[in-house]
Image (cartoon, rainbow, N blue to C red):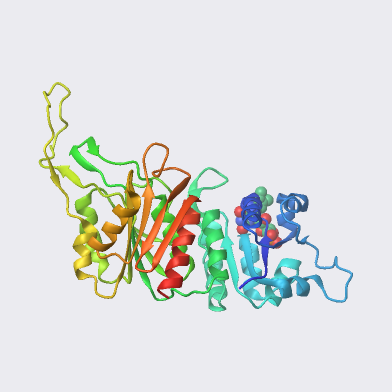
Amino acid sequence: MSGRIIIGVTGSIAAFKSLELVRMLVKNGKEIDVILTEAGERFIPKVNFKSFTSGTVASDLWSEEVNQPIHIKLSKAASILVVVPASADFIAKAAAGIADNLLLSTFLAFNGPKIIAPAMNPNMYKNPITLRNIRTLRKFGVDFIEPTTGYMADYLIGVGHLADLQDIFDYIEKYERKQVLKGKKVLITAGGTREFLDPVRFIGNPSTGTMGIELAREFWKFGAEVKLISANISKQIPSYIKNIEVINSEEMLKVVRKNFKASDIFVSTAAISDFTPRTPKKVKIKKSTDLKEIKLKRTIDIIKEISKHKGKKKIIGFAAETLNLESEAEHKLIEKKLDLIVGNYVGKNRGFGEITSEGIILGEKTRIEFSGLTKPELSRKILEVILQVWY
Ligand SMILES: Cc1cc2nc3c(=O)[nH]c(=O)nc-3n(C[C@H](O)[C@H](O)[C@H](O)COP(=O)(O)O)c2cc1C
């Protein structure tokens, strides 16, 4: 689906956030028209949006002097309509079919996909009248991006906070894509495990989990049901992704085993420790202890272990290497019965936590070298390969 995107802005305190969303969308090549309600315009004058989009920015239903009214013109050109933020008042009027302003008229005239991201005071959101209005609109096929719990304008915490802008952006992209992975279940591991020596010290690694999160986003946008198993990630995980948190390699193995059976694709991006202390201490090792060595034992290789029960499932592995990347990745591809492997160079200023990465994607019939790709770009490339080769 491609066409213009209408962003509707209503009279919520969160209206300023829609400016950043428009900026993100335009930066990513989308064509945006903005419709403000009268209250929305009190918060953000049109000129702000006009600085970001060359599309229409309008609020007046009666402004256009053409034979085609503006709400019909805008709705015909659009492929998706997103109201962000949506006030309780807008939701109530839309649910009742009221069309007494430009945004409401366009909402009613437009018969493509409609998304609403509410933002309001928790009492307004939890009010049974608002909840009923949301249910009514849902019944008519309108999609809602639920508000989160966070600090409100009065500095109190409650539900009603506008959803994360990146999540709203992802919803829009999902609607633009063919849902070729609908019905597929994808299990992704991300982050880095921690093997504790005592309650306060561990063997770890600098993995941030970004690769796993970005891949989760991409799979989801193509319609897959994604579950993430995350180890020690401090980054925000998209609200639409199911997430199970683990700490060490043993827990990771347990949770992967439990969820692998029900999945169609398993993607292992997590940096899982190959070693763990043989006898972790229950109390903190004293500084005064004459500690000369730490006895380690090998951890179980998760991919090797689960690929024994692979069946028709697809497995994607990652290899972080400092040297001989291609031969090491090829060896892992065969040894671990992978369907695809993404080899990354790591080391000083390379790999973990870096903005761009370089490496190679290998499969039975795939050999693609890449460099200078950000993690979102690399995720898109990996999905391109998957869709071309497997589906
Ligand atoms: C300072 C201020 C902040 C407001 N914030 C919100 C809000 O976050 N969510 C909401 O639903 N209404 C909020 N309201 C109330 C709406 O602006 C009001 O209901 C208005 O009629 C909405 O009009 P609209 O739906 O046409 O945009 C706020 C009002 C004021 C004065």
The quarter of the picture where the N terminus appears is bottom right
Disc tally is 0
> Where in the figure is residue 355, as x and y percent of width and height?
48, 44
Q: Residue at x 31, y 47 (%)?
A: 192
Q: Nearer the viewer, residue 272 or 255?
A: 272
> Where in the figure is residue 36, as x and y percent of width and height?
72, 60
The quarter of the picture where the C terminus appears is bottom left
Q: Is residue 203 above or below residue 18?
A: above
Q: Residue at x 41, y 41 (%)?
A: 350
For residue 86, say whether it is visible: no
Residue 4 sits in quarter? bottom right
Q: Is residue 391 above or below residue 16?
A: below
Q: Nearer the viewer, residue 328 or 262?
A: 328
Q: Residue furthest top?
A: 288
Q: Is residue 382 left or right of residue 154?
A: left
Q: Residue at x 64, y 63 (%)?
A: 89
Q: Is residue 47 above or below residue 385?
A: above
> Where in the figure is residue 119, as x and y percent of width and height?
57, 57
Q: Residue furthest right?
A: 65
For residue 51, say whether it is visible: yes
Q: Is residue 39 left or right of residue 133?
A: right
If the picture is divided into quarters, which one holds ligand 1?
A: bottom right
Q: Is residue 11 left or right of residue 280?
A: right
> Where in the figure is residue 24, as x and y percent of width and height?
61, 53
